[in-house]
Structure formats: C-alpha cells, structure tokens
Image (spheres, rainbow, N blue to C red):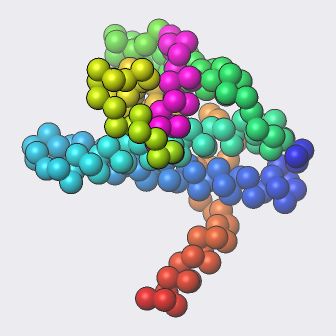
C-alpha cells in the first residue's frame, strides 16, 4: 500500500519505528549491563539475560530498518530477502564510511568494509530469534548457519553503529513524543486487572 509520511499509515509507521527503536535500545542497554556483570559474576541468569537481550535487540533493530526502508519507499509492500540484504549492507556501509575518517584515526582496527554476507546473516539471526525453530539450539558441529556468538564476533561493531546512530536512517528523533495508543491501552488493562 502506498502512503505518505503525513497520512494515517505514514504516521502509524513512524510510531511503529519509534517503538522498534525503543525496544532495540532498551534491550541493548540491558545487554550491556549484563555483559559487564558477567565479567565478574558467573551467573546463569545473567548469561540467559545477556543472550535474550542481545537477541531481542537484533530482532527489533532488524525490524526497525525494514520499517525505515518502507518509510523511505512510501510503500508497505513486503520487500524481497535479497533486496533487504542489499539495503542492510548499504546502511552498514554508509555508517562505516561516515565514521571511518573520524574514528579510524583513533581506532586502527576500524573495519574497512562490511562483509558481503552481513545482510543475509542479519536476516538469518533475526529469523532464528523470531521463530521457534530447532536450529536455534544446534551445537557447533550441527550448525549450517551463523550462530549468535559468531554473529556477535563478526558484526558487533557494525551493529553498535546501527543501534547507536539511528538518526542517519531517518530525519526523526529517536522515539520522543510518539503516540503509542496500544501501549497506553495495554497499561490501562494491566491497571484494571492488577
């Protein structure tokens, strides 16, 4: 469905984008806190919480960028996986290209490129996180796809840029001031049923 950023669909998509970005940012902060505690505490709850927070951050971040592509296109139609992979690579490449002259001077290990398989691996991880699929629990010798650990090792630098600098993906503020009617409705239901 075609839309403009000013019509009802465009405004609701902007609110949805804000909600996905909020979710990704909140899970990222939880992940960062848990990962700091894991350095000094070998606690099963912290391990599970860090895993889930990072997984959920990736799911929300992926959905945020899918929504950004639709927002820019002015169309709610489903994008093909290959198109999404290419566009995810372009977002990551643009962020690295923007920050390389500044940070590359300070950080000699700043990546020169985004691996071609980044978009596909991001989609694969998002699918494993979003669906109850046995492949999520495969051991290293059974695996035919990228694992969360492998994804983190290979792409965390790029993901950090994508989550901490979303302003390059659209002209809006992060998520301040959005009207999240379903959130209000749900919280009112909780109050009534508490």
Q: Is residue 55 visible?
A: yes
The C terminus, quarter of image = bottom left
Compare residues 38 and 122 and report the one nearer the observer: 122
Q: How many marks?
A: 0
183 part of magenta stretch: no
Residue 132: x, y in percent? 47, 46
Residue 91 in view (yes/no)? no
Q: Position of residue 60 (x, y in %)?
A: 53, 46
Asked whether, in this view, residue 49 is left or right of residue 163, the answer is left
Quick check: 27 left or right of 15?
A: left
Report whether 183 appears left or right of 40. right
Where is residue 137? Give x, y as percent: 34, 37
Does residue 150 sit above or below 21 in this rendering? above
Q: What is the magenta segment's predominant secondary structure?
A: helix
Residue in the foreground of this view, choosing between 114 and 134 = 134
- What residue is drawn where x is 21% and y is 50%? 46
Task: Name the one closer to the observer, 119 or 28.
Answer: 119
Determine the image quadrant of residue 182. Answer: bottom right
Residue at (29% x, 46% y) in the render? 50
Residue range of the region highlighted in magenta in the rendering: 113-130
Seen at 69% across and 43% down, the residue is 67
Asked if the magenta segment contains residue 114, the reply would be: yes
Q: Is residue 31 left or right of residue 132?
A: left
Q: Is residue 66 above or below residue 89?
A: below
Q: Position of residue 156 (x, y in %)?
A: 39, 28
């Amino acid at each position: 469905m075609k839309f403009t950023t000013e019509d009802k669909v465009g405004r609701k998509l902007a609110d949805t984008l804000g909600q996905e970005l909020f979710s990704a940012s909140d899970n990222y902060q939880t992940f960062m806190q848990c990962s700091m505690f894991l350095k000094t505490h070998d606690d099963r709850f912290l391990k599970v919480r860090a895993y889930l927070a990072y997984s959920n951050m990736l799911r929300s971040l992926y959905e945020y960028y899918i929504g950004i592509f639709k927002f820019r296109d002015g169309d709610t139609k489903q994008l093909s996986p290959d198109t999404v992979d290419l566009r995810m690579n372009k977002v990551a490449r643009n962020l690295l290209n923007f920050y390389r002259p500044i940070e590359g001077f300070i950080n000699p290990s700043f990546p020169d490129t985004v691996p071609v398989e980044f978009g596909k691996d991001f989609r694969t991880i998002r699918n494993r996180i979003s669906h109850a699929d046995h492949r999520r629990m495969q051991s290293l010798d059974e695996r035919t796809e990228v694992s969360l650990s492998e994804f983190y090792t290979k792409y965390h630098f790029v993901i950090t840029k994508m989550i901490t600098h979303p302003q390059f993906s659209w002209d809006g503020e992060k998520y301040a001031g959005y009207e999240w009617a379903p959130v209000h409705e749900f919280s009112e239901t909780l109050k009534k049923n508490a």
